Image: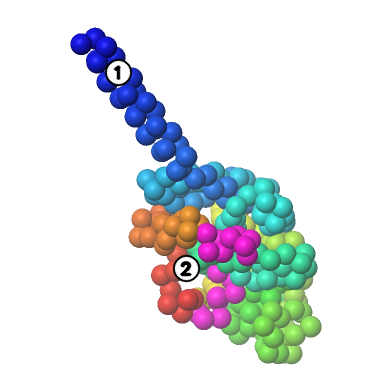
Amino acid sequence: MKGILLIFITTLSLFILAGCGGNQSSSKTVKVGITGANDPALEKVKEIVKKEGINIKIVQFSDYSQPNTALANGEIDMNDFQTYTFQSDWNKKHKTNIVTLGTTVIAPMSLFSKKITKLSQLKKGDKVAIPNDVTNEGRALQLLESAGLIELDNSKIPNLRDIKKYNVGIKISSLDAGQTAKSLDDVTAACVNSGVASDAKLNPKDAIYREKITAKSKPYVNILSTNAKDKDNPTFKKIVKAYHTKEVANVIKKQFHGYESPAWTYKILQ
């Protein structure tokens, strides 16, 4: 009887161990690169996909060049930090093949000022600062055009040479995107990215003009990216599906206080 009981216990133990081993082998770890120290939306996605045996490991980077370099080198599996335009520009310059898995957020750029309270107060000779990198410079110029301050030639990503008319006579100066908020003490107004505005504690409601979300906003939608060889990875697709849920949309609306909005909820951006 004891022998039979011992065999039963041994068999049961092996069955349990085999089961545990199976669960461990089915768990998948996906390294996702971000910029900055916090991404509440991705943390919520991490929580959702964990139930499906997917473990997201968030890898933090300090600047915009590192996440794509790490992705191309195979050090991470995906990244969550860039826009369509940034990705396209990066691929051209670095001869990489990074592709889009799905959209995440849209973060409107705003025109802030410490010297005036409304757009109509801008006058000839007033200095307006814009970011100097290709992507954000073009976006800022389109923002100024939509505000009626300038007119541009037809160009997908405009630069200063594409300004064909100044309607108010403002003077535009370019500087690093991270310095635009700090420049508000020295200029009349500045075009500031949402992330920079958030770090500087600038309230979107205080902006004298804000980028309108239209079909033209699509190039500036933030995305989840991976290498082309992994574009059909079923695990990555599950992560995108988890991102595009009401739970994550609610986190974005609650945590970002209007700086960012869930991009997949806008039909015009699809």
**Residue 44 sits above or below residue 183 on the image:** above
Q: Nearer the viewer, residue 254 or 48?
A: 48
Q: Is residue 91 magenta?
A: no
In the rendering, at what x and y percent does residue 188 appear? 68, 69
For mark 2, what is the residue? Answer: 263
**Residue 185 sits above or below residue 160 on the image:** above
Q: Amino acid at mark 1?
A: Ile
Tell us which disc is closer to us: 1 or 2: 1
In the rendering, at what x and y percent does residue 149 appear? 64, 83
Q: Which mark is residue 7?
A: 1
- Is residue 118 visible in the rendered structure shown here? no
User: Which secondary structure, mark 1?
Assistant: helix
Cα–Cα gap, marks 1 and 2? 59 Å
Find the magenta span and give its range. 214-233
Quarter where residue 69 is shown: bottom right
Residue at the (76%, 67%) spot, across then down: 95
Q: Is residue 14 left or right of residue 112?
A: left
